[in-house]
């Protein structure tokens, strides 16, 4: 049985930390702990991209977490335009490496287009959570 949890966040830099905390809490409650650091780095990158590039003023973005056996999938959905892509910024640039980091850490990632929104997702293969570690009754 798949587990699913979603939460909306306002377009604010503080939402990146809140999204990371939401995902950490979810993974901990579900017992998915062995890839937690990789997942959280990717959440930070995708949430930051949503805030900086994807969410129009006055709107929110949504973070979803799916646990299905040994698979964790994290989705960040926003209503902005544009197609996220991996770029190679000049060495002197401070930004532009987020999706490169995501592609290096996640087992898979991609973009699903909806009209007018998009969902950027990552997937991680990890150990199965122990049934005794699942404490929120979602299973």
Image: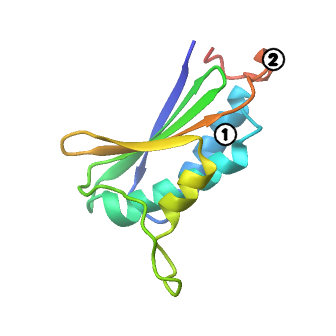
Q: Looking at the image, tell me whether mark 1 or mark 2 is earlier in sequence order.
A: 1
Residue 14 visible, this angle: no
Check the picture and name the quadrant holding the C terminus: top right
SS of the residue under disc 2 = helix
- Judging depth in this view, the residue of 138 and 109 nearest the camera is 109
Check the picture and name the quadrant holding the N terminus: top right
Residue visible at 49% across and 75% down in the picture:
95
SS of the residue under disc 1 = helix
Task: Identify whether 86 is placed above or below 79.
Answer: below
Percent across and percent down for residue 129 are: 75, 23
Cα separation, mark 1 vs mark 2, equals: 16 Å
Horizontal side, residue 115 vs residue 89: left or right: left
The residue at which mark 2 appears reads as: 132
The local crowd at label 2, few if under 14, some if 14 to 19, many if 20 or more residues have their Cα within 10 Å, is few
Residue visible at 73% across and 21% down in the picture:
134
Horizontal side, residue 99 vs residue 80: left or right: right
Contact (CB < 8 A) between labels 1 and 2? Answer: no
Percent across and percent down for residue 84 are: 35, 57
Q: Name which quarter of the figure residue 26 lies in.
A: top right
Residue visible at 48% across and 43% down in the picture:
109
User: Please, which residue is most extreme toward the bottom here?
Assistant: 92
On residue 25, the disc is 1
Horizontal side, residue 130 vs residue 123: left or right: right
Residue 81 visible, this angle: yes
How many marks can you see? 2
Q: Name which quarter of the figure residue 2 lies in.
A: top right
- Judging depth in this view, the residue of 46 and 122 nearest the camera is 122
User: Please, which residue is most extreme toward the left here?
Assistant: 115
Percent across and percent down for residue 99 are: 48, 58
Percent across and percent down for residue 58 are: 27, 58
Colour mapping used in the image: rainbow
Task: Identify whether 123 is placed above or below 30.
Answer: below
């Amino acid at each position: 049985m798949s587990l699913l949890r979603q939460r909306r966040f306002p377009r604010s830099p503080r939402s990146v930390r809140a999204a990371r905390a939401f995902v950490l809490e979810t993974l901990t409650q579900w017992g998915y702990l062995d890839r937690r650091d990789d997942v959280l780095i990717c959440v930070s990158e995708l949430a930051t991209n949503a805030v900086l590039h994807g969410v129009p003023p006055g709107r929110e973005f949504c973070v979803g977490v799916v646990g299905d056996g040994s698979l964790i999938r994290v989705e960040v959905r926003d209503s902005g335009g544009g197609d996220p892509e991996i770029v190679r910024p000049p060495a002197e640039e401070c930004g532009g490496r987020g999706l490169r980091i995501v592609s290096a850490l996640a087992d898979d990632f991609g973009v699903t287009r909806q009209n007018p929104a998009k969902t950027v997702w990552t997937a991680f293969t990890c150990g199965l959570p122990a049934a005794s570690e699942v404490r929120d009754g979602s299973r």
